Amino acid sequence: MLNELLSGGSIAIVSGVVGFLISKKITAANFEIYVEQAKAKAAAIDNEAQNLLERAHLKSREIEMEAKKQYESVKERVKEDLRQREDTLAHDEERFKKYKEIEEKKIALDANALKSKEINLERNEKSLSVLKEKYEKKLDEVVHAIENSAGMTKEEAKTLLLKNIEEKSRVEVSHIVRRYENEAKEEAEKKANFILAQATSRFAGEFASERLTNLVHLENDELKGRIIGKEGRNIKSLETLLGVDIIIDDTPNAILVSSFNLYRRAIATKTLQLLIEDGRIQPSRIEEIFQKVSDEFEASILAEGEELIADMNIGVMHPELMKLIGRLRYRASYGQNALAHTLEVAHLAGVMAAEMGGDPILAKRAGLLHDIGKSLTHDHDGNHVDLGAEVCNRYNENSVVINAIYAHHGQQEIQSIECGAVCAADALSAARPGARREVLESFLKRVTEIEEIASAQTGVRQAYAINAGREVRVIVNATLVNDDESVLLAKEIAKEIEEKVQYPGDIKVNVIRESRAVEFAR
């Protein structure tokens, strides 16, 4: 039994050894195969890498050649541009040299001409001095001759000569005045426009400050910061929506609303007052309040127009025309409210038409609509006559109304009693004392007339009306007017002012004659 076990064990050991050797042999054979495969793959990868490297070298050489080609092209273009700029610069330099030479020649010529003029002036001055001496000698000889022949003294002869010279001068002055009057008539329109422009420019500041601003009171100055808002957002939103200028300055507890359009200014003022009362001042709230106020104003002007039409009993009228009539409350002319003027004209025209046998209702209607175009002048181009006629034609108004709109400014002939009544009533309403602010305009006209009378005299260099038009200061040319002539000139100016200008009190005419001797130390 033991032998069997030993023999079995031996066999098992031998079998294991043989199996191990066989397995090792097989493994070694497989490893060699794997090694050969790995070498083959490595060789393939190496070949692929070599091919990629060669292609990369080729690509890099192509890119390098293309870059070099582009570089050469750019280099040529830059060289060409540089050559062109050098040529332009050289051309400009050449032109500048020529221009400089021309200008230097001109300066030299001007200098020579100036020097020649100076020499001629010196010669003329010397000649003038000589002539003046000769004149004085001749004058002395004439005086002696008059004294000897007429048996008069020097003072008597001087008085006679001055009288003759004065009479002769007056004839010459009359010719000059006549010539200037003819020239003034030829240029009357141009001169009138110039005077109006001057008067307008002088009156504009006062008019703007009094008539084109509304004052909004504040409880305290802290509200100014809230109205401005963060980074100015609130005030920008206000000015954009309202279409006005809001002036916030150092005036305590107040801000100004400025605009030529009275209607927009009224809406803006009401909007600001409501925002200040509400306390919530922000862009969204501003838009909400503005829309609410605008709707209220539109409704109020329509209601006011309807009420006026009903009170005057002039029949049915289109709602848009009634709205425009209500809007006349926010329009002014020469300081006179347009709606008040319109109502005056309508009532006067109705009374006159009734007295003359015309239709008083039609006359009142024409008077109420004769200035309707003034409601549109702020928002549309053109004068109020054409705008009014256009809107009345659009809503089929009576031909008498259209005729009154044109005729009250002389653009058509009066074609009916009613139209004549409207034109007369318009003139009466405008000319009524206190209706319009024309005191300043008449004052400016009077001052301008005084200055023109003084400036038109011979020998006058400048004339200024001062002391509120109660004094005119006249500066004369000392070489043309002597001391005696200045006295005569003052009398003539004063007499002409008395004849041509209407004024209260007295006007002092002050003639100033100044002579200066100027010389330079070189």
Image (tube, rainbow, N blue to C red):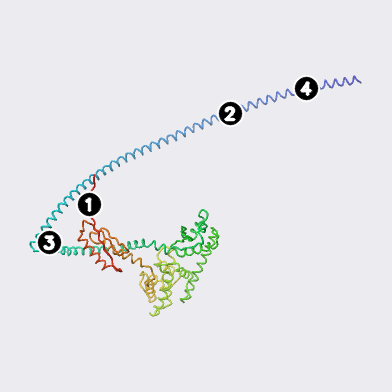
The residue wearing badge 1 is 517
- Residue found at the very far right of the displayed protein: 1
Task: Identify which amino acid the numbered label 3 is placed on.
Answer: Lys
Residue 168: quadrant of the picture: bottom left
The residue wearing badge 4 is 22
Q: How crowded is mark 4: few (under 14 residues within 10 Å), some or many (20 or more)?
A: few
x and y percentages locating residue 295 in the rendered image: 52, 66
Instruction: Say whether disc 3 or disc 1 marks the residue closer to the N-terminus.
Output: 3
Instruction: Say whether disc 3 or disc 2 marks the residue closer to the N-terminus.
Output: 2
Instruction: Say whether disc 1 or disc 4 marks the residue closer to the N-terminus.
Output: 4
Task: Judge whether 14 appears above or below 477 on screen.
Answer: above
Q: Are marks 3 and 2 in contact (CB under 8 Å)?
A: no
- Residue at the location (49% across, 73% down)? 307
Find the distance from the CA under tag 2 to the CA under tag 1: 106 Å
Find the distance from the CA under tag 2 to the CA under tag 4: 44 Å
x and y percentages locating residue 516 in the rendered image: 23, 53
Q: Which is more foreground, mark 3 or mark 2?
A: 3
Closer to the camera in the image, 436 or 479: 479
Instruction: Say whether disc 2 or disc 1 marks the residue closer to the N-terminus.
Output: 2
Q: Do the residues labelled 2 and 4 touch (CB within 8 Å)?
A: no
The residue wearing badge 3 is 154
- Is disc 4 placed on a helix, strand or loop? helix
Instruction: Point out the image quarter for the N terminus.
Output: top right
